[in-house]
Image (tube, helix red, strand yellow):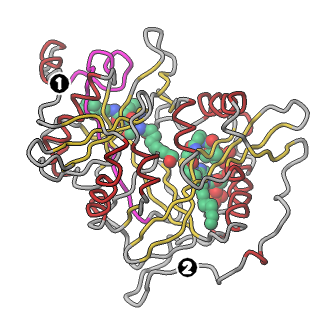
Amino acid sequence: NYAFWGTQPVAQFNEQPGSTVTDGPIDKPKTVADVCKEPYGLPQNFEWVTCNIDSDAELKEIYELLSAHYVEDDDNMFRFAYSKEFLRWALQPPGYQQAWHCGVRVAASGKLVAFISGIPATVRVNACALKTVEINFLCVHKKLRHKRLAPVLIKEITRRVNLHDIWQAVYTAGVLLPKPVAECQYWHRSLNPKKLIAVGFSRLAPRMTMARTLKLYKLPEAPQTPGLRQMEDRDVPQVTALLASYLRHYLIAPELSEEEVRHWLAFQADVIYSYVVESPETGRVTDLLSFYTLPSSVIGNDQYDLLKAAYMFYTVPGATPLPQLMNDALILAHSTGHDVFNALDIFENEKILKELKFGIGDGKLRYYLFNWRVARDIPASKVGLVML
Ligand code: MYA
Ligand code: JJ1
């Protein structure tokens, strides 16, 4: 019973994948000439705007909308608090379109009350490299919820993307919609257990004291892999090749140009932390490790208002075993002030999360494709795409 999603070119729950189904588009083929040139109608008193991320004032408006109204956990204890610098990084990759930073304002006051964004990306799904848009940051002000504004935002961004002759999209959400191509599980590794317990993110395990808990999660001060250092611009060609050969093993993964690798993996404190292992013998880059910073507001706690979380981004084990590389990621995230390290059970993570003292979270992340059918669902361990 999905009044909106039942009308869209997405896989539906009732479809039984027969053995003859092959990957391909769901809609009949269209051209840019078929696309409506006028924006969708909004309810009276609202107007469309294209947001200019380069403007500090406009970026601040998006930041404030998301800080107060974006994704919360199931118990409404934490809400994602993407920083302004992070939003710039997330929304301005190579080839970004300003028209895909799409807002809704109240006409009279000019107040920004809704947002949706898309960025261009080539994503390979099974054997097909798709020119797609990655949709993210869909948000409607809490006072305007359940008025069917979200479907209008989705149809408008679809129109704006279709005008660029792009017909497929990728998106992730915590909620269940028709119909995930993959379902992934969040895992969490405590870095600052005392604070995590104080804010209700985690609990003292049965028969554990605070002292034993601190000892359990204690980490060395410095990374342990010889040759590990911050990634630099000169590493981009080798990192691009290393990533490409790694991502080939996954059924859904981005295809990244050197320019995109430079954008997504340039070290930027408090946004994206990226490190490489340079072989002391050959001087070649053998491994990559990266995580991004996404704090969450702590709702209604008088001791703390922000939880600083690191999220695993692209990590490629080459000469270094993955558990050792990930342990260095934990050490680096801790020493850069993060309280918790979050990861999904994608890539080869499932095998190593337990030994690194991750615990299972209460959140899931579903991956979706728009206007693309796949013959088979993709298991989490075959997902090689990280969305912010
Ligand atoms: S996921 C993050 C989404 N944001 C949040 O969760 C922030 C907090 N929540 C809100 O701001 C609102 O609750 C939102 C819904 C805006 C989510 N993705 O207006 P409504 C369907 C897709 O009355 P509201 C992210 O950013 C719902 O099933 N659809 O509801 C990726 C119902 O449809 P149906 C969703 O609560 C976004 C309809 O909306 C989501 O006021 C990818 C109700 O609308 C959701 N997360 O607003 C978007 N949540 O009747 C799709 C609810 O069928 C992109 N709904 O059940 C598709 C590709 C487009 C480009 C294509 C190019 C080719
Ligand atoms: O962060 C999440 N859950 C936490 C907090 C739970 C608070 C109560 N609901 C959690 N904590 C337990 C950790 C513990 C650490 C020590 C070891 C044992 C485990 O489980 C969850 C993920 O698990 N986060 C969310 O629910 C946020 C929303 C996730 C969907 C994201 C949608 C993104 C959309 C845009 O692309």
**Residue 294 higher or lower than 315, as above or below:** above
Classify 10 Å Cα crowding around label 2: few (below 14), some (14-19), many (20 and above): some
Q: Along the horizontal axis of the image, is 215 left or right of 49?
A: left
Q: Please give the range of residues in magenta.
A: 181-206
Secondary structure category for the residue under label 1: loop
Classify 10 Å Cα crowding around label 1: few (below 14), some (14-19), many (20 and above): few
Secondary structure category for the residue under label 2: loop
Q: Residue at x 57, y 38 (%)?
A: 88
Q: Along the horizontal axis of the image, is 125 left or right of 299?
A: left
Q: Residue at x 31, y 39 (%)?
A: 231
Question: Which quadrant of the rendered structure holds the N terminus?
Answer: bottom right
**Residue 354 higher or lower than 95, as above or below:** above
| Residue occupied by mark 1 | 222
Residue 337: x and y in percent read 33, 20
Which dot, 1 or 2, sits closer to the camera?
Answer: 1
Residue 196: x and y in percent read 32, 21
Name which residue type carries label 1: Ala
| Residue occupied by mark 2 | 25
Name which residue type carries label 2: Pro
> Splitting the image into 4 quarters, where does residue 30 fall?
bottom right
Residue 353: x and y in percent read 19, 43
